[in-house]
Image (cartoon, rainbow, N blue to C red):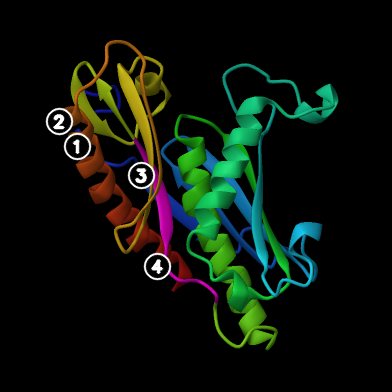
Amino acid sequence: MRPSGRAADALRDVSLVPGFARHAEGSCLIRMGGTEVLCAASVEGRVPGFLRNSGQGWVTAEYGMLPRATHTRGEREAARGKQSGRTQEIQRLIGRSLRAVVDRAALGEMTITLDCDVLNADGGTRCAAITGAWVALALALRQLERMNVLKRSPLTGQVAAVSCGLVGGAAVLDLDYAEDSTAGADANFVLTDAGGLVEVQATAEQAPFTAAQFAGLMALAEAGTAHLFAAQRAALG
């Protein structure tokens, strides 16, 4: 029995609230169980120097956790004067995941930044950030279409992410903190609605796991993201 009482193939309760940040061009508050992440998209009419005069746009992300997103207070990274390696790794993952479903030539020379701020953390924050950020990005692009800045949406598909792991030797979907902290192996899967793999991060925390066990985790991830894709579409109306 999982600590939450869920079946092995069950997601936590998922909620996607579009338009949560009133001033952003696009935003979404995503809740996955006890994890809550606010994702906000901001549009700028310029690109980084390495893309200037290329005709291509840029999609990037920043990620952070509020000091009391976890059980004990974490120091603000701004107070330390630098980001942790974990933060940098996660925000690069979010950016790569979103760029995988954007036609940057169709976007043109503008930058869309997705700010993903963890309000409450109970495992799977990077996966929730990717899933919610896609909704915020889609809303921002709709706004640009309404303003005739874009003639068509540069989105080529959906992207979502979910965690899976081996807990007590069994493959389970969407780990919360209680499971993630004791898992024998854990993996984060970033998938597109067309069935494409964007990124897989898989680690054995204890004994090595087998190819057959990995295939079981992959199957859970595919089923889990199918539900997330449906939730994204519902959030966009």
N-term-proximal mark, 1 vs 4: 1
Quadrant of the rendered image containing residue 184: top left
Classify residue 4 as left or right of residue 19. Answer: left
Front-lying residue, 31 or 64? 64
Farthest left residue? 212
CB under 8 Å between discs 2 and 1: yes
Label 4 Cα neighbours within 10 Å, binned few <14 / some 14-19 / many ≥20: few
Q: How many marks?
A: 4
Q: Is residue 22 visible in the rendered structure shown here?
A: no
Quadrant position of residue 9:
top left
Q: Residue at x 55, y 75 (%)?
A: 154
Q: Residue at position x 48%, y 63% from top?
A: 101
Q: Between residue 3 and residue 129, name the one nearer to us.
A: 129
Disc 2: which residue? 212
> Closer to the camera, 97 or 132?
97
Callouts 3 and 1 close, C-beta under 8 Å: no
Instruction: State the separation of the CA atoms marked 2 and 4.
Output: 32 Å
The residue singled out by tag 1 in the image is 215
Front label number (3 vs 1):
1
Mark 2 to mark 1 CA distance (whole Å):
5 Å
What span is in magenta? 154-163
Where is residue 178 drawn, in percent x and y? 38, 20
- Which of label 2 and label 4 is nearer to you? 2
Q: Position of residue 216 (x, y in %)?
A: 18, 35
Q: Secondary structure at mark 4?
A: helix
Q: Quadrant of the N terminus?
A: top left
- Check the picture and name the quadrant holding the C terminus: bottom left
Give the residue at mark 3.
Answer: 13
Are there few (<14), some (14-19), or many (20+) residues within 10 Å of tag 2?
Answer: few
- In percent of width and height, residue 107 lies at 63, 74
Residue at 54% in and 68% down: 138
Relative placement, left or right, of 46 versus 131 is right
